[in-house]
């Protein structure tokens, strides 16, 4: 797992215009450009190889492999209350936070703006209990980040079992980065730029 983290960090360092210092406007613009470059190139390299349907169908079952917090899953989802929702993602990749009755509470990684998603993915990899492919993530470790804690608070969502319309794929640590940036999402009612804008606005309102 350390090798995966190292590869991602090395990739970020060689991105066009990447800077660790984002304290100025120019630095922020260049870093955003770098993350977009990373996302676009991952998409170009992978999107034609597998359809979303095939990705979910591989290595999947009708049940959650680990029905406990700290694992990442992907499935096709149609919210039972979709008419009342401002937007939703038909193919979410969720980090599970809690199982409760006929639902799982989690955060859809697709809703995280690209720069925040990279930060989250790095912390997810660093927060694994072990190098085992089935290792769980220490949620409490992620919550130590004040920034990510805000995004988790804003984006925590209930996914009802009755709304799951496909098999459920357990996304293993070696798949976090690629699957989180592949264009496998299917946003409804809003475009991704609109969703990112809404999410950022909600986070900014938190103290």
Image: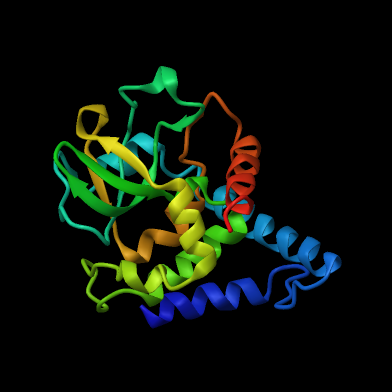
User: Which residue appears farthest toward the right when viewing the image?
Assistant: 26
- Looking at the image, which residue is at 24% across and 67% down? 136
- Looking at the image, which residue is at 62% across and 49% down? 200
Vertical relation: 178 (above or below) 143: above
- Looking at the image, which residue is at 33% across and 49% down? 106
Could you say where residue 148 lies in the image, as x and y percent from the top left?
A: 49, 63
Image quarter where the C terminus lies is bottom right
Viewer-proximal residue, 60 or 47? 60
Using residue 204 as the reference point, say whether residue 96 is left or right of it.
Answer: left
Vertical relation: 194 (above or below) 27: above
Viewer-proximal residue, 203 or 7? 203
User: Tag count in the figure?
Assistant: 0
Viewer-proximal residue, 65 or 48? 65
Could you say where residue 20 lies in the image, as x and y percent from the top left?
A: 70, 78
Viewer-proximal residue, 10 or 94? 94
The colouring scheme, among rainbow, by chain, secondary structure or one colour, is: rainbow
Using residue 97 as the reference point, say whether residue 118 is left or right of it.
Answer: right
Could you say where residue 185 lies in the image, as x and y percent from the top left?
A: 47, 38
Quarter of the rendering containing residue 116: bottom right
Vertical relation: 49 (above or below) 206: above
Image quarter where the N terminus lies is bottom left
Could you say where residue 181 lies in the image, as x and y percent from the top left?
A: 51, 52
- Looking at the image, which residue is at 53% across and 51% down? 112
User: Which residue appears farthest toward the front when viewing the image?
Assistant: 207
Using residue 60 as the reference point, say whether residue 127 is left or right of it.
Answer: right
């Amino acid at each position: 797992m350390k090798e995966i983290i190292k590869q991602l960090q090395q990739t970020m360092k060689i991105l066009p215009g990447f800077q660790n210092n984002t304290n100025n406007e120019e630095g922020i613009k260049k870093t955003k450009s770098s993350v977009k470059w990373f996302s676009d190139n991952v998409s170009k390299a992978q999107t034609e190889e597998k359809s979303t349907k095939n990705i979910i169908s591989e290595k999947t079952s009708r049940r959650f492999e680990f029905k406990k917090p700290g694992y990442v899953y992907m499935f096709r989802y149609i919210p039972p209350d979709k008419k009342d929702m401002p937007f939703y993602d038909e193919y979410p990749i969720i980090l599970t936070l809690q199982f409760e009755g006929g639902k799982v509470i989690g955060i859809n990684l697709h809703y995280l703006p690209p720069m925040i998603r990279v930060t989250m993915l790095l912390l997810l990899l660093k927060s694994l209990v072990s190098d085992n492919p089935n290792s769980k993530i220490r949620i409490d470790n992620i919550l130590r980040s004040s920034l990510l804690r805000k995004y988790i608070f804003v984006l925590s969502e209930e996914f009802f079992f009755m709304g799951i319309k496909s098999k459920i794929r357990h996304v293993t640590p070696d798949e976090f980065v690629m699957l989180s940036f592949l264009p496998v999402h299917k946003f409804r009612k809003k475009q991704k730029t609109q969703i990112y804008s809404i999410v950022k606005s909600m986070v900014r309102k938190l103290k």
